[in-house]
Image (cartoon, rainbow, N blue to C red):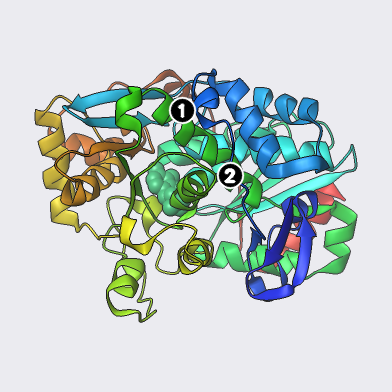
Amino acid sequence: MLLHNLKDSSEQVSFVQAVKTGLGRNQGVFFPDSLAPLTNVDELLEMDFVTRSSHILKHLIGDELTAEQVSGLVERAFNFDLELVEVEKNIYCLELFHGPTLAFKDFGGRFMAECLAEFSQGNKTTILTATSGDTGAAVAHAFYKKDNIDVVILYPKGKISLAQQKLFTTLGENIHCYAVDGSFDDCQAMVKAAFLDDEIKQRLGLNSANSINISRLLAQVCYYFEALARLPQAQRAKAHISVPSGNFGNVCAAMIGAVIGLPVAKLSATTNQNDTVPRFLASKDWSPTDTKESLSNAMDVSRPNNWPRVQHMLDNNWFSYENFYSNAVDEAKTEEVMLQLYNKGYLAEPHTAIAYEGLTRDLATDGVGVFLATAHPAKFKESVERILDVELAMPKPLADALAKTCLAEDLANDYHVLREALLVKLA
Ligand SMILES: *Cc1c(COP(=O)(O)O)cnc(C)c1O
């Protein structure tokens, strides 16, 4: 698989290089030069999830990895379930929160971890990442107890929910967590500083596990095939998929799926009040505003890193602008839709409710809708209980994590302090 930097087309890399590098020159993201269609989609849709996913990823990655290597990665990464639930006539919910950290990020995070472990070939590797919530947990669980790999996670102290935090700060072993006296942006700035520090980079074998890594996107393509595989054959070609979107990685994966032959009629990338993309589509003017805090905090992104990839496919007509929708859902509407869904018998957290609302706004009368549930309701216990006036039971992984002690160390918002700590602990 050949990829190029969307900001500098002279930078070309292989899949393995793209996974190891993460981000290209000038902060440009990598994207495949071309996406060849699958020739056996009907046959693939008859296969089980893991077998089919291995075929799809081998097709996308090409000759760089053997079929055995790819199926090994897939079997180790995708070792948990997903569900397609009928919520009302012709509207289905694809539940992606049955993994170890109860959010869809387990799919991409686990596959990326398997790739990095395979490609680092036993060399000492340190994964350094900043998290605003769900990514930290997915990455930590994915690398937990992997040989020769240490994970360092920075998070803004007191600014993520207790459930989100305890899912990664209680692991110990090779997972090292720092509660930074600052914001998520401060954490990201320290990560960037470390990557510009050659001594640290070399002595620790520094590697990123950030949200723009191409391996995460490719992994996410697989569950869209599973969603359609579970629909009756006659409904597949009319399917309209709605993805709750923040950084636009998940909807980018859906679009890659459509480009290689998944029969989807329409895609909706629905946002919360952070509506840079909906405004851009309406006005052709890219004007991010300050990020606003929302009930759906994993989508509080005003400069979505993956948008250039989506726009690349749209501008090149790989997927038609006509079949792509992006609307914003405000806070009041999010609460209203959570209640509406609850009254239909489906309990959804805020991100999922936004996907449902985006779907029903644009679903054709003869269309078949699939909206994504990206997190377990218990991960957003406080807002779900308040809005729906219910009491939620804690699923086992969360109850277990909440009962354990937080092992994170406090850290000043100062790169030099982090640098010293890393050298003492890991060099
Ligand atoms: C990360 C996240 C999203 C947004 O996904 P993107 O790929 O960034 O668009 C939506 N819902 C939940 C629960 C998330 O954790």
Q: Residues within 10 Å of mark 1 (few under 14, many from 20)?
A: many
What percent of the width, then of the height, locates residue 238? 29, 38
What percent of the width, then of the height, locates residue 232? 32, 22
Q: Name the residue under label 2.
A: 37
Q: Residue 226 carries which label?
A: 1
* Mark 1 or 2: the one toward you: 2
194 left or right of 247?
right
What is the C-alpha distance between the residues marked 1 and 2?
17 Å
Is disc 2 placed on a helix, strand or loop? loop
Residue at image position (79%, 25%) is 68
Residue at image position (17%, 51%) is 361
What percent of the width, then of the height, locates residue 424? 83, 52
Please, is residue 289 above or below residue 162 in the view? below
Please, is residue 46 above or below residue 308 in the view? above
| Quadrant in the picture for residue 113 | top right
Residue at image position (73%, 31%) is 70
Q: In front: 173, or 360?
A: 360
Which comes sooner in the sequence, label 1 or label 2? 2
| Quadrant in the picture for residue 63 | top right
Q: How crowded is mark 2: few (under 14 residues within 10 Å), some or many (20 or more)?
A: some
Q: In front: 316, or 16?
A: 316
Q: What amino acid type is highlighted by mark number 2?
A: Pro
